[in-house]
Image (spheres, rainbow, N blue to C red):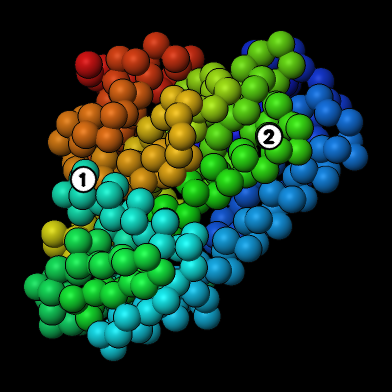
Amino acid sequence: MFLRILLLCLAVALTGCSRSSVHQQEAFVFGTRVEVLVWGNDDAAAQHAMGAVLREFDRLHTAYHAWSPSELTALNAALANGERAPVSAELATMLADAQRLAAIGDQLFNPALGKLVALWGFHSDQFSPQQPAPTALRALVDSAPSMADLHIDGGEVWSDNPDVQLDLGGYAKGYALDRAAAILRAEGIENALINIGGNVMALGRKGDHPWQVGIQHPRAPQPIAVLALYDGEAIGTSGDYQRYFELDGRRFSHLIDPRTGEPASGTQAVTVLVPPRVGAGVLSDVASKPVFLAGDGWREMAQRYGVEMALRVDADGRIAVTRDLRARMKPLGGIEIDRVVD
């Protein structure tokens, strides 16, 4: 994965820590590996809190799955039939927030694109290397389903566009980070690291040092750099290296540009770091998508979301990073930063 948790106690002498002080649980949820680390608490308290987090992840995964039977698929069936559908208060709140965030980025973050995601074969745990029929693809691009087509009134949701099909894959991991942080704090856990397939949030510290995470290059085996992550900060990543297939020498990823209906090809990976704030997890998850899809306009798109710390690897492997994030990074592995931007 592009951004992975690194304990770094032995491989890189940055923390001087003892692994015996780290408690860990992991699982496979949201189609990826998730990991919760707790520092310093007694084992029973740590295990209880981490178990509560993983149970919450299971709940969210089941409730809002994009293609297995769930509250979300029931809503999508109603939307396809032009019907109003009752939804839970939680889902209504999530959709209203996603709608707000989609508008900021001119719908480049677009959870209404579920039909396009499915058309490319990514609504499956295993996908085949084939392109969709051009006529079906063009019909969906012309229909232009977006979050602006969605209406939310109290506990009811409906759409003017029957091609709206919701997929919260670019929102739910960030939401889960925020939920995990709330659960851990309620359980009395002050120092923890939560990793959902490269979407990471830190609580407190790891002993005498901040938590350390590594930014892995999407094409090289070694990290680009290591950076310190402080209490309440969250990192989101989007890349073309996890869910993708290759056909005729071209890589097709699940990151689809709603303007073309095609998987984006101008960027290999993006990382954004969000400082402590309400909804930091959600913002880190969401903002990485439009920044990825914006191509050479990535910096301006990041600024729309209030993100000052971001890194992009373009299609040719060139690395650009904002000045604020560069100041936090400790380069590793001889991989050079090609450009620093304000």
- Vertical comparison of 114 with 242: above or below: below
Numbered disc total = 2
| Position of residue 305 measured from the top left corner of the image (x, y, whole percent) | 27, 35
Per the rendering, the mark at residue 105 is 1
Q: Secondary structure at mark 2?
A: helix
Q: Position of residue 131 (x, y in %)?
A: 26, 74
Q: Amino acid at mark 1?
A: Gly
Going 26% across and 17% down the picture, which residue do you hit? Answer: 340
Q: Nearer the viewer, residue 149 or 44?
A: 149
The numbered mark, 1 or 2, whose residue comes first in the sequence reads: 1
The amino acid on which the numbered mark 2 sits, given as a three-letter code, is Arg
Depth check, mark 1 against mark 2: the one in front is 2
Q: Give the left or right position of residue 164, taking residue 138 as reference.
A: right
> How many other residues sit within 10 Å of disc 1, few (<14), some (14-19) or many (≥20)?
many
Horizontal relation, residue 64 to residue 105: left or right:
right
Quadrant assignment, res 260: bottom left
Judging depth in this view, the residue of 145 and 2 nearest the camera is 145
Image marks 1 and 2: residues in contact by CB distance under 8 Å: no
Residue 255, visible in the rendered structure: no
Question: On residue 185, which mark appears?
Answer: 2
